[in-house]
Image (spheres, rainbow, N blue to C red):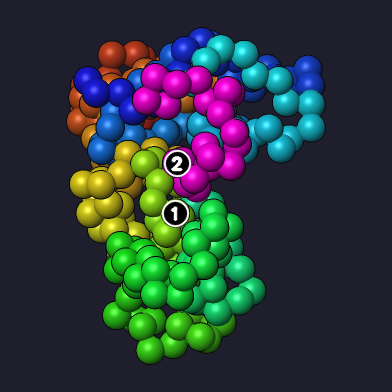
Amino acid sequence: MNKKIEAIDIQLHYGDFHALKGINMGIEEKKVTAFIGPSGCGKSTFLKSLNRMNDLVDGCKITGEILLDGANIQQMDPNDLRKKVGMVFQKPNPFPMSIYDNIAYGPRTHGIKNKEELDYIVEEALKGAAIWEDVKNKLNKSALALSGGQQQRICIARALAVNPDVLLMDEPTSALDPISTAKIEELVLSLKDNYTIAVVTHNMQQATRISDNTAFFLQGEVIEFGETNELFFNPKNQKTEDYITGRFG
């Protein structure tokens, strides 16, 4: 298994609360890894630790190691890390500016000023997020005028614009209708040719549709982790089976 990210004995506390307990996991390169489990089980907390978003939370302490291509992310500049490991949130959160400026925001922050270069990056990112055809004639219009599903694809394009290696998605379709959800799922499947993707989802059917590997979290621990089909159709742990068949959670 070609591990893009490796977590080694991750323990995470918010003050006195022990949120992650000894997480060990390898996230495979150019595959989709899904995190499932009941609310409050640690899956989003773990996702956010992969690009140090938890650094921004007061009273958060983390021990253990997270390696990106073998390098410890705690020793990286957070901005460099977040350029390599992009994030898409549950609720679409485009900036209150034009579609063009939303996508160009990251590259500009990283020092790209040339208009031709920015035009190219914006177009490629929007194509990558499968929304170029919808918006190519209204790049100067506000991104907030788009539908929820389109806004989420703008947020994905914004993440792609800085050319990351990894894309983290925290329940990217939970605020969307079924048609938009299907489009985002299709997009995720097309993106894994070029990116390593980790996605938190409450929707177990979604995990079976889009992911290669799945981790089942419960009370801050990974109960089971393996190939998605194997985990869903032949779980090794009784707790996994109980969760998947709806006996709890």
Q: Is residue 110 above or below residue 224?
A: below
Residue at image mark 1? 162
- Front in this rendered view, residue 207 or 27: 27
Residues under labels 2 and 1: Cα distance? 8 Å
Count of number-bearing discs: 2
* 172 relative to 128 in the view: left or right: right
> Disc number at residue 106?
none
Q: Against 59, is 209 above or below?
A: below
> Any magenta on residue 97?
no
* Residue sticking out furthest to the front: 114
Residue at figure coordinates x 29%, y 58% from the top left: 187
Q: Residues in magenta? A: 67-87
> What secondary structure is marked by label 1?
loop
Q: Where in the figure is residue 227, as x and y percent of width and height? A: 23, 26
**Image-based side of 37 in relation to 62, left or right:** left
- Considering only vertical position in the picture, is 17 above or below 125? above
The amino acid at mark 1 is Val
Query: CB of mark 2 within 8 Å of CB of mark 1?
Result: no
Q: Is residue 173 visible?
A: no
Tell me the element at label 2: helix
Q: Whole-percent x and y of residue 241? A: 33, 22
The residue labelled by disc 2 is: 84
* Residue 235 visible in the current orientation: yes
Q: Amino acid at mark 2?
A: Lys
Please name the residue shown 50% across and 76% down the image: 99
Give 125 or 62, whichever is nearer the viewer: 125
